[in-house]
Image: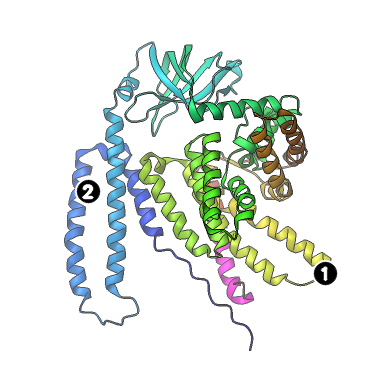
Amino acid sequence: MPEVTPPRVRDLRLLAPAVALWVGAWVGTSEVALAPAWAGATLVAGGLTLVAIPALAQRASRRPRHAAAPVGSLLAAAALVLCALGVGLSVGWAAQHQRQADPVVTLARDPPAQVELLLRLEADPRSSTARWERGAMTVRARVDGSASGATVLLRARGMESLARGDLVRAKGGLDPAFPVGGTWIGTLHADQVNPVERPGGWRGISREVRASLVRVCGDLDPQAQGLVPGFAIGDDSRLPHDLAEAMRATSLTHLTAVSGAHVAILMAVVMLPFRNHRVLGVLVPALVLAALVALVGPEPSVLRAVSLAAVLMVGTLARRPGSAEAALSLVAAAFILADPWASRSFGLVLSVAAAWAVLVPAHTWDRVIRRKLAEGGPARTLVRAVARAATVPLACQIVVAPILLLLRPNLPTWGVLANVLAAPAVAPATLLSLAATALAPVVPGPAHALAQAAAVFTGWIAGVAEHLAAWPWAGLPLATGPGPLALVLALGAGGRLAWTWGRGRWNLH
């Protein structure tokens, strides 16, 4: 008898509550949530729901006990979704009201000519890309002592000696027009930025490690001066402008950020010696992740990468991507509960979408390729290797393309090809860069040698970006408006229908 492969079960029980929580937080953090009429309508709808559920449950109890779809279970699921929606509305509404009551936010609505703020830098200052502001630097900063966590884009000159974690006193004109939304209150064009305090403890150690890596990379090629720190600690501030544009046109910018892929590469190496030790296999990777967060900084993007990488590892090691989908829903819900403003963050949307693309379509395609091309000569082996290498970038490109079009109306035509060509160099570049980072404060000589080795692999990635960016239709500009987005969504829906039809016709399971 032919071997029958059991169908793979996907655990989607937490998907609807997570989406409801996200939607509720998004609505709750909007300006509409401040209207008394809207709040009253929400309370009335919630009360009617609480009254309707017991009535429906009593009616469902008269249904056959062994029905194919027990109504009681459906009602319980509906109640859970409504509860998640209510929780999302509540935490979002609370965050919005806390923001409106913040005196700093009140000041930003109608700022005076000169504003003086005590700020904590949340990143390293980097040079402004605006041609009319040559020499100026920008950095995201949080207002110290702000109850709502108000953030401002600080723009000034002479911030070369400052770094993430520094406490500064800045004075200048506040422009509330940009950036807006979430906790942002605008841009502070500072005439004076005076350091008040440098961080100590683990923040000070992290600062020294980062500075040591920059010194070690000081005499490398220009591409390596930007890419080696980028691969190690997400610091691409020294990346040449032309190379940055080439990587953007070829969809390679995610390589210079601490993404889930980087964390997964690191964890795969760290977990290898402890795969047979249950306690150490959990404790050591957890300590390494904590050290990575301390080094790179507990920014939302880093925490997302660490959390979602853990989800990806769980799904891969357990060979249960369905369970990983449930864990992904749980992680997304946790981020929304911890920070309701994250419901409006494109960063969280992109992170969750990319993680889902790796867990579901890429995993499915990889399984089909391995089964259909399991045996054969060298030619088939080569085709299988190339096809498997293309699954992750292709899945991610398809899933995140509609989101990216909302941010930047450019189509990275050669993005999948660029990611496939760059893939062999990503792991060695990441591991060598991290090793150079670890040794830089202690033994700069060996650290420099490791950075030089990493530069070989980053040079390959830079070459891929520059060559493909010069090809026709690279970074193809699209017209603004709903047309391109609708086209991409239609292509995605058509691909999904074709895959569903092909699964039954060609046994693609």
Report helix, strand or loop for mark 2: helix
Report helix, strand or loop for mark 1: loop
Mark 1 or 2: in front is: 1
Q: Is residue 410 above or below residue 186?
A: below
Pinpoint residue 290: horizontal percent, then vertical percent. Answer: 51, 41
Residue 501, picture quadrant: bottom right
Q: CA distance from mark 1 to mark 2?
A: 64 Å
At a point 57% along the width and 60% down the height, the residue shown is 316
Which is more toward the observer, 194 or 171? 194
**Which amino acid does the dot numbered 2 rest on?**
Thr
Q: Is residue 490 visible?
A: no
Residue that mark 2 sits on: 42
Q: Is residue 371 above or below residue 100?
A: below
Pinpoint residue 91: horizontal percent, then vertical percent. Answer: 30, 43
Q: In the image, which disc is placed on residue 104?
A: none
Q: Is residue 464 above or below residue 126?
A: below
Question: Mark 1 packing: few (<14 Cα in 10 Å), some, or many (20+)?
Answer: few
Which is more toward the observer, 127 or 110? 127
Q: Is residue 400 visible?
A: yes
Task: Please provide the residue range marked out in magenta.
Answer: 494-507
Pinpoint residue 131: horizontal percent, then vertical percent. Answer: 61, 19
- Is residue 497 located in the magenta-colored stretch of the structure? yes
Pinpoint residue 235: horizontal percent, then vertical percent. Answer: 61, 32
Residue that mark 1 sits on: 377
At a point 76% along the width and 34% down the height, the residue shown is 449
Question: Mark 2 packing: few (<14 Cα in 10 Å), some, or many (20+)?
Answer: some
At a point 33% along the width and 39% down the height, the residue shown is 29
